[in-house]
Image (cartoon, grey):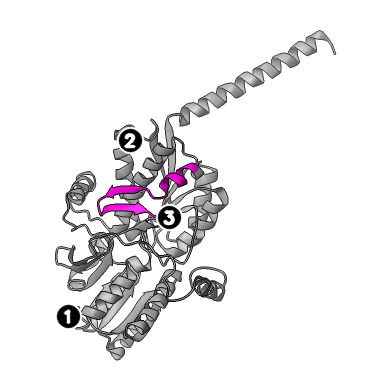
Amino acid sequence: MSIKWRVLIVASVIAGIILWWFLHSQSHKKTDGIIKVGVLHSLTGLMAVTEGPMIDAVNLAIDEINENGGVLGKKLVPIIVDAQSDWPTYAREAERLITEEKVLVIFGGYTSASRKMVKTVVEKFNNLLFYPTQYEGLETSKNIIYMGSTANQQAIPAVTWSLQNLGRRVFLVGSDYIYQHAINSIIKMLLTARNGTLVGEEYISFTQQSVDPIIEKIIKAKPDVIINNIVGEENSRFFKTLRKAGISAEKIPTVSLTISETEIASLNINEMIGDYGVQNYFQSLDTPANNSFVEKFKKKFGAHRTISSSMQNAYAGIYFWKNAVEKAQTTDTDAVREQLRGAVLSAPEGIISIDGKTLDTWKPVLIGKIFPNKQFGIVWNSVSTIAPLKYPPLMTKEHWDSLLEYYYTKWGNQWWR
């Protein structure tokens, strides 16, 4: 090989190295000083009315953190995606957020069906999901921080209070996926243990066009109380049809586990007044911490806006993660997770903490009555936080696992019907 060709080859190699360095440095300039976080919620479809506002709560927390120096001196940048109220889309978008967008954590999901789909993704890539909604428990994962309540922090207190204050004949109604079936299994066992009577159990699919047959069964069953677990826009059809049939809150009160201020804001309040909701947070909670939170949220997004328990959970989740990263001095998943175990936070709902073993959250329980101002008047408050319980002692863990497997197999290896 001649000297001339050798010189050309060396020059080409050097030029390639310089080009690689330039492109690499430019790429780093684009991402240097920022931390990307994923925000996975539905902006379209039946769940948009519930999940859309949760993005605002996340953005409020991120803006506050960025205004105060960010995390480890870097600004947080939310990468927001629309899961389209479609459970498989949650999984696809979660994987894209991790592999293509390179997010270090995901905040999102609402239904248990969506969480189950994302669970496999964050476990595969050892990422973290902060899940902001109440759920059935009955699962463990080192990659999910459960910001919502377990059954003993919502459903069980709701039924116990209803039996004591509203009556012992109970009708269960819910959307047709795993959360409702699992929670209702827990409720039915509780009714048996506490001398309650189940007089009916019905489910509404996301493609069901009429709720009339369910209302007819409610009329025939003559319950003392309806325990409602319908999610999203389907509540509008349910309550409208209920009232058209002459079933008022005075005649047969409804206690909802999935109705919050955001759903009420989109419904006809005249069809809701006098019914009840059970959550871990209500906007009407009169404490200095919550009043400050509500004021900041309304200032940013409008005085007409309302705040739900899941929105508050989403807001608190950002701060839990931020604090853990700063204690760990790294965004590494394993290091951050260890700092999250036992972490304590002063949140709008009160002083809450993450359980060191389960990664669930210790939370208070509130029961509220719906008022004409579209808010909940608190009629019962646990005051102190309640420890999360993954598996209610009504059955063994093995029996609970078998129950979930039964539904999963029955529905064609998916978490919804």
Structural crowding at the residue carrying mark 1, measured as other residues with C-alpha within 10 Å and reported as few (<14), some (14–19) or many (≥20): few
- Looking at the rendered structure, the kind of residue marked 2 is Asn
Residue at mark 2:
66
Q: Is residue 338 magenta?
A: yes
Which residue is located at x 39 percent, y 37 percent? 326
Q: CA distance from mark 3 to mark 2?
A: 26 Å
Q: Quadrant of the N terminus?
A: top right
Within 10 Å of disc 2 (Cα), the crowding (few <14, some 14-19, many 20+) is: some
User: Mark 1 = which residue?
Assistant: 250
> Which residue is rendered at x = 21% and y = 84% of the image?
246
Residue at the extreme top = 3
Which residue is label 3 attached to?
Answer: 359
User: Marks 1/3: CA distance?
Assistant: 40 Å
Vertical relation: 3 (above or below) 289: above
| Residue 80 coordinates in the image, percent (x, y) | 41, 46
Return the residue nearer the eye: 58 or 356: 356
Do residues under tags 3 and 2 come within 8 Å of each other at their CB atoms? no
